[in-house]
Image: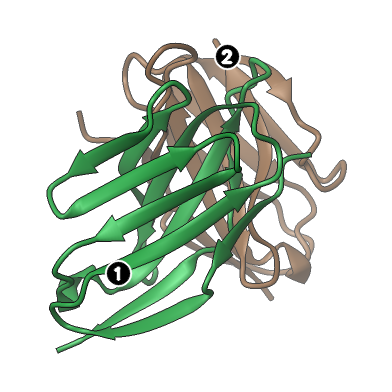
Amino acid sequence: KQEVTQIPAALSVPEGENLVLNCSFTDSAIYNLQWFRQDPGKGLTSLLLIQSSQREQTSGRLNASLDKSSGRSTLYIAASQPGDSATYLCAAQPGTGANNLFFGTGTRLTVIP
Amino acid sequence: DAGVIQSPRHEVTEMGQEVTLRCKPISGHNSLFWYRQTMMRGLELLIYFNNNVPIDDSGMPEDRFSAKMPNASFSTLKIQPSEPRDSAVYFCASSKTSGDTEAFFGQGTRLTVV
């Protein structure tokens, strides 16, 4: 069974700082990897999806990379803002034809004004 | 599109009562997922459907839980009888089955069983 781990569990940074969130997965045979944001009491918002054939995806200040061979993905947030404060979750879709997602436990980010 | 729509947003019920959660997926998506989120266990897949057919229900905790998808635009998750340990946030998500399988989530139903 795919195991997804996110480190650190919590991160606090001053506004304007660039930061990296880490995600690792045990089974490298994935179809894609997706990053989500969750605000307290809310649902999950999709941020970026990286197909297994891709190395990275970018959206605004966000850049996600994928290294299947090492079982790692990173989410880079440039010039962080207080509005970026949320929990960030990564999820791996298996490459077996199943299209469910295996989630990490998330990184809770706080950006201090 | 309005996104994935779940109802109710909040549900408080007494132990032993039946609870029904509802989900409308995004139009054109043919995969639908039910997840449960708790502090202790994070996000867990309960069941998912492809083209209205249950594919994997191995995450359904026990026989008290059942899910149906009678058509492409509606699904229910039922708990009967409910127990306090079922208290959690239940999310529905949808995606396409192949190609771009980006998943989109509803706002969730916060269930409290007292």
Read off the residue under disc 1.
A19
Q: Give the quadrant of residue B51.
A: top right
Chain letter matching colour brown? B
Expressed as whole percent of the image width and height from the top left, the position of residue A67 reads 49, 39
Image hue for chain A:
green
Read off the residue under disc 2.
B52
Q: Residue at x 47, y 47 (%)?
A: A73
Is residue B107 visible from the viewing direction of this image?
no
Expressed as whole percent of the image width and height from the top left, the position of residue B4 reads 35, 36
Is A92 placed left or right of B63 in the picture? left
Q: Give the quadrant of residue A38.
A: bottom left
Q: Which residue lies furthest to the front in this view?
A: A69
Asked if the residues shown at circle 1 and circle 2 are in contact, with their CB atoms under 8 angstroms apart, the answer is no
Does B50 sit above or below residue B44?
A: above
In three-dimensional space, the C-alpha distance between marks 1 and 2, rounded to whole angstroms, equals 41 Å
User: What type is the residue that disc 2 sits on?
Assistant: Asn
What mark, if any, has residue B84 been given in the picture? none
Q: Residue at x 39, y 18 (%)?
A: B29
Q: Which residue is drawn at 26% across and 48% down?
A: A63
Expressed as whole percent of the image width and height from the top left, the position of residue A1 reads 79, 39
Does A103 sit above or below residue A40?
A: above
Circle 1 residues within 10 Å: few <14, some 14–19, many ≥20 = some
